[in-house]
Image: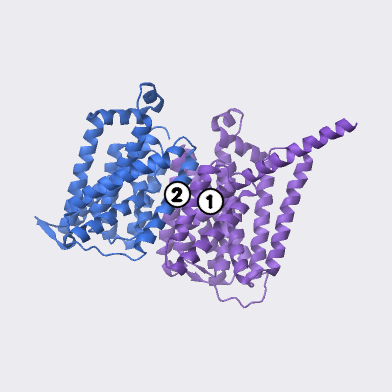
Amino acid sequence: MQRTSDQASDAKRWGAGVAVFAVLAVVGGVSSAYVISLLTIVLLFTFMGQSWNLMLGIGGQLSIGHALFVGIGAYAVAILNIKYGITPWIGLLLGAAIAGVVGAVLAWLSFRFEVRGIYFALLTIAAAEFARIMFGGWDYVGGMQGLFYPAPSGTMDLAMLRGDSQFYYFVALVLAAVGVAGTELISRSYWGYVWRAMRDDDEAARALGVRTFRHKVLVVSISAAGAAIGGGVLGLVQGSIFPDSIMGMGISVDVLIGPVVGGLGTAFGPLIGSMAAIPLHHAMGSLGDSLGIPGLNSVAYGAVLILVVWFLPDGIWPAVVRLYEAVQLPARSRISQLRKVEE
Amino acid sequence: MLSLWLNVLASGVLIGLVYGLVALGLTIIFGVMRVVNFAHGEMVVFGVYIGYWTVRIWDVPIIVAAAIAAVVMFLFGYLLETLVVKRFVNRPHHYQFIVFIGLSLLFSGVLLMSFGPDPRPTASQLSFQTVKVGPLTLDWARIQAAATAGLLIAALGAYLKYSTFGRSLRAAANNRLGGLVVGLNIPRVYAVTFGIGAACAGVAGALISPLFDAQPYLAVDFTLLAFVTVIVGGLGSFGGALLGGLTIGVAEAIAALMFTPSMKTALPYALLIIILIFRPRGFFGAKDI
């Protein structure tokens, strides 16, 4: 994480962000269908990873059950849309609201009794698994057979959020951009400072008058709502929803792998991490399929996680920033010295 | 009706002892090293495959298979600790968790690669034998598994309590710095602890191999089951793991009788959520995290 208050570097960072997303927009215009559908997933997990990142990277609360919130969002959109024909926009808002409340209740219940750290992480898994099994046995939401969206007609319909794969690519791109910019803004706001303070030292933050209990509930709730929005769109993109796939442990791992690999607590980390990890997972999956070796993708995922935490504990992005500074800064200071000599 | 209930309770208690052994492995590792072994379920499944293959190839009794699993998995755990886990013991919890998620993905991938995704029905004749005790009709495999697990738990308890190494292990669990000060070889204690934990999981896996079809996807269920068990009992508590195992075993058996099968799988999680909310450290949990 860069902590320079330097305005020039600030502008540079925003400029770099805009440039990255502009490039991604062009990529979406010219790439093949396969690349577009893969990048759509990458961008959606960037957004959901960003919500997870807010919670651990900035707020200091570890969740390994984000699939719960992703699933709530996906089901809210799907039930309203498939059963009642209501636009996904309302479903997204409703899903975010429900997930926000569920997250707040979970956080309230556990932080009230000082259930923290490992215990909170295990509670999130338990809640996600419990919800997965309950949804699997609940006929109204389709049970294990899941829910299916009608096949897309191919015409773009922004009001009903329906369109071809390119349309969803741009939806995911907008979400990812909002996620990256939002994290940057939140992390520099009052909340961001308060959250980092309670992440680093809860007692010290409380001694300074921060009501850390409320802020923990708040950060979990916001993170949950974000994950639900991502989940709602993910369901639309996939066209079908099953409890085992949308609420399973696999989703929770997919959500956290981006920020962990890319850089915890940074705005760009989840984007870079998802870009690196998710295509690798897919490539290894199809390589494994063609060679007849199942499990290759799982081995690759596991190895990446271990190696990153081992050798790059801050993730890829902070390492890139350090490298850039190591190359750039000496050069600049040499230039300014030369100027002084000229004067 | 009464005999049905008795049967269900008895089989719940029997499988509960095996769950207790699985949980004991997790809780010993946590109690001493303060790391949560997210790959515990994979270690159970390694044990299931060891049980499956040894019985299938050499046709040995399940007790021998369990002994082989104990040796193999102890060495595996010992090596894993010295090569990998060691480097992360002093890192923040979330890093450890992520490393263990990585290990769990890695191991389940390796299991899939080596044995394929299809379940392998057990080859042992043991799975079909039953024993009648008064009104009870019990699986012979279940009785053997439970008896072995119970004996092992007792033996491990005695070892930790009375042997010199057990004392140094408990000292390391109690106060790592104090242990270093009095000259304990902490790295060795940690490696052996991890080995014992892995061996508990492996033996439990071998013992239940006549009851479950060997299948890589079992791992996640066992990991979560072990978490639930230790949290119900209290992370880091020896007696808690046993009590948690029995609670979950009996609760599952009753739920299977009274509700639909999906309720049976959901029940441990519901129990866990309730316990975490009302008694966050479990029945006998450690005071600090």
Q: At label 2, which amino acid type do we have? A: Ile
Chain in blue (letter): B
Which chain's residue wears label 1?
A
Quadrant of res B153: top left
- Is B13 located above or below residue A140 in the figure? above
State which mark lies toward you, 2 or 1.
2
- Is B2 located above or below residue B174 in the figure? below
Toward the right, the furthest residue is A343
The residue depicted at 55 percent of the width and 46 percent of the height is: A220
Q: What element carries label 2?
A: helix
Position of B63 with respect to A32 (left or right) is: left
Compare residues A240 and B36 and report the one nearer the observer: B36
Q: Position of residue B77 (x, y in %)?
A: 34, 43
Q: Name the residue under label 2.
A: B101
Position of B128 with respect to A54 (left or right) is: left
Local packing at callout 1 (Cα closer than 10 Å; few below 14, some 14-19, many 20+) is: many
Compare residues A309 and A143 and report the one nearer the observer: A309
Circle number at residue A256: 1
Q: At label 1, which amino acid type do we have? A: Leu
Local packing at callout 2 (Cα closer than 10 Å; few below 14, some 14-19, many 20+) is: many
> Quadrant of the image for the N terminus of chain A?
top right
Q: Chain A is drawn in which colour?
A: purple
Circle number at residue B96: none
Q: Can residue B23 be seen in this view?
A: no
Q: Where is residue A85 in the image (x, y as percent from the top left)?
A: 58, 72
Asked if the residues shown at circle 2 and circle 1 are in contact, with their CB atoms under 8 angstroms apart, the answer is yes
The residue depicted at 89 percent of the width and 33 percent of the height is: A342
Q: Can residue B96 be seen in this view?
A: yes
